[in-house]
Image (cartoon, rainbow, N blue to C red):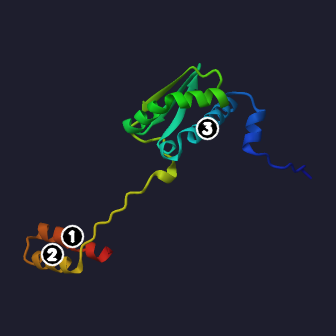
Amino acid sequence: MPKRHTPETLSNLLSKSSGNLASIAQRSQQLNTLNTFLAKTVGDTIAQNCRVSNYDRGVLTIETANSAFATRLNFMLADILSNFRQNVLPELANITVKVVPNNKFLRQEQKKEAVNNNRISAKAAEYILEVASNAPDGLKRRLERLAALQKKG
């Protein structure tokens, strides 16, 4: 009978391996730690709109959603630098702030689905159908589709 072994967690497997996957996992874990510390340093409002995107040779790069948050981060830069040096990265030399306007980095729970709220009243639908009854075929179909928005509500 084959010997059963207990399953291991992914983080445990990655810590044992040595190679590209292990270095990527380690890098990802380092960036997550830096992001957690950044959130504690700057507060929730700013933390929801920025993230640590890179740390290389003493330079920490923070990406933000827009220039307003970049300005706020730049005003806080001395405090952020000091806190990171004291608690996490004593070798930190500089922090750069970059604006990433496409909001790719925002957390999934922040992204909202676009909801189609196009609704019309029953009375408006009635008037549209009345006009459609005397309209040419192409316009009639479009007006009937417009009146159908009332049924969705």
Where residue 24 sits, quadrant-wise, is: top right
* Quarter of the picture holding the C terminus: bottom left
Q: Are marks 1 and 3 in contact (CB under 8 Å)?
A: no
Q: Classify 56 as above or below 73.
A: above
Label 3 to label 2: alpha-carbon separation? 58 Å
In the image, which disc is placed on residue 37?
Answer: 3
| Residue drawn where x is 45% and y is 31% of the image | 75
Depth check: 5 or 62 in front?
62
Q: The residue under label 1 is which amino acid type?
A: Leu
Residue 19 at what x, y percent from top left?
70, 27
**SS type, badge 2:** helix
Residue 88 visible here: no
Pair 1/3: label in front: 3
What residue is pinned by disc 1? 146
What residue is pinned by disc 2? 128
Residue 89 at what x, y percent from top left?
64, 26
